[in-house]
Image (tube, grey):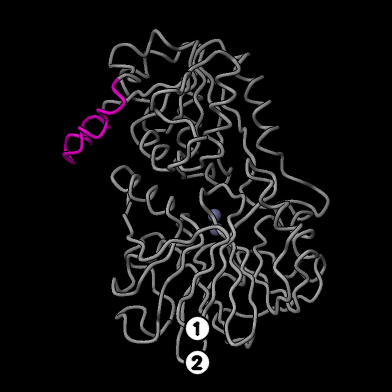
Amino acid sequence: MRIRIHRGTREIGGTCIELESAASRILLDLGLPLDATDPASAPLPGVDGLADGSSGLLAIVLSHGHRDHWGLVPRASPRIPLVMGRATESIMRAAADFIPDGVALNAAQHLEHGKRMQIGPFAILPRLVDHSGFDAYAMEIEADGKRLFYSGDLRAHGRKARLFEALIETPPRDVDVMLMEGSSLGRLAQDEAFPTEEALEEVFVERFRETPGIALVACSAQNIDRVVTVYRAAKRTGRTLIVDAYAAEVLKATGTDSIPKPVAGWPNLAVFIPQRQRQQLKQKGIAPLVDSYRAFRIWPGQLAGHGARSVMLFRGWMMSDPDVVNVLAGARLFWSQWDGYLRDGSPGAALRADCERRDIPFEVVHTSGHASPGDLKRLAMAVSPRRLIPVHTFERLRFPELFNNVMLVDDGEWIDV
Ligand SMILES: [Zn+2]
Ligand SMILES: [Zn+2]
């Protein structure tokens, strides 16, 4: 088996790793580069058969549903089978009608935790991991008697932290090459750690208690861990979490009983559909979609009465909604995503400026979707691969300082496993 990383040896974004055994190949991830302004014109990696689906390229395997791991798939030949988690597929489908450049990808096969699958000469054992993206997998891959372990994106401080501990306790054995993400390197010092989702819940509880009006939380509806954190903090402070139709559909699409969603049995949850979204649903002919949660609806004209008893999952464009405008007295806004999205010129910066104009206090309450350096060290020690190759990092030169057996490679270089 040999591999080449098309993108990711020196950056986060555009992840794409090609594996070859005999005359067969698969791709792990096919992400959109972070610097790509237009997905339609970003160049495809130089992988034979990617554009025309010609022989030998057996599948594209997606570790999870973040765009930096699947964003170029719509540009690839539709003849190439896709493999991803079941919830990843259904969340993407649910989101497709609501987000710009949303697409519904069809999986030919699903990754399942602990269930080995065979794609040509490649035996793949997916392992569900803790990450800010739901249904994310690391993968052990065996071919030609060689073993590769790809971490995907992962962390140890989220709501599924026990999955990381399980990985440490029963790590993949006899690994020839480990491809490990290093997103946190350069963002945190070696001895620093990101706060846990549980610690974040405590912060939200405190902040919601101090907020006289509605608490607006700007986070991704697809960051399911975070939505759960916000929901729990809302419930603990006697508030109702208000979500829009997009978040409602994404929560339903998780297909997981323990995730709050607008179905019978979930208290402290309501659905408010902003005017612009109501129009969108009509235009797309999908208005009946929301009928199933009529009982959870806060209707136009009713939101103002809910301010002090509510937390709302929020995005910048909602600020001008006529109902939202009427519920802003005493409101506070909590930014609960990467602060990189607050850089000058970004939509986050515009939201912050909007809050300033409206005298709405703005505060960042967030934790990373990626493992702290200390947790990466624990993982590398547990797996102890013969060679450890950095991916998904801007700081590959930090790897040799922190981990054993590091091999630095270049984008596009073939490596024998
Ligand atoms: Zn991710
Ligand atoms: Zn990523």
Mark 2 sits near ligand 2, with its Cβ under 8 Å away? no
Q: Residue at x 55, y 13 (%)?
A: 238
How far apart, in angstroms, are the residues tagged by discs 1 and 2?
A: 8 Å
Q: Which residue is mark 2?
A: 22
Nearer to us in this view, 132 or 160: 160
Q: Residue at x 39, y 86 (%)?
A: 56
Q: Quadrant of the N terminus?
A: bottom right
Q: Residue most toward the bottom?
A: 22
Question: Pointer 1: residues within 10 angstroms few (<14), some, or many (20+)?
Answer: some
Name the main secondary structure of what is drawn in magenta.
helix
Residue 376 within the segment the image draws in magenta: no
**Residue 310 place in picture, x, y as percent:** 48, 16
What secondary structure is marked by label 1? loop
**Residue 155 place in picture, x, y as percent:** 66, 51
Residue 279 within the segment the image draws in magenta: yes
Q: Which residue is mark 1?
A: 121
Amino acid on which the number 1 mark rests in the picture? Pro
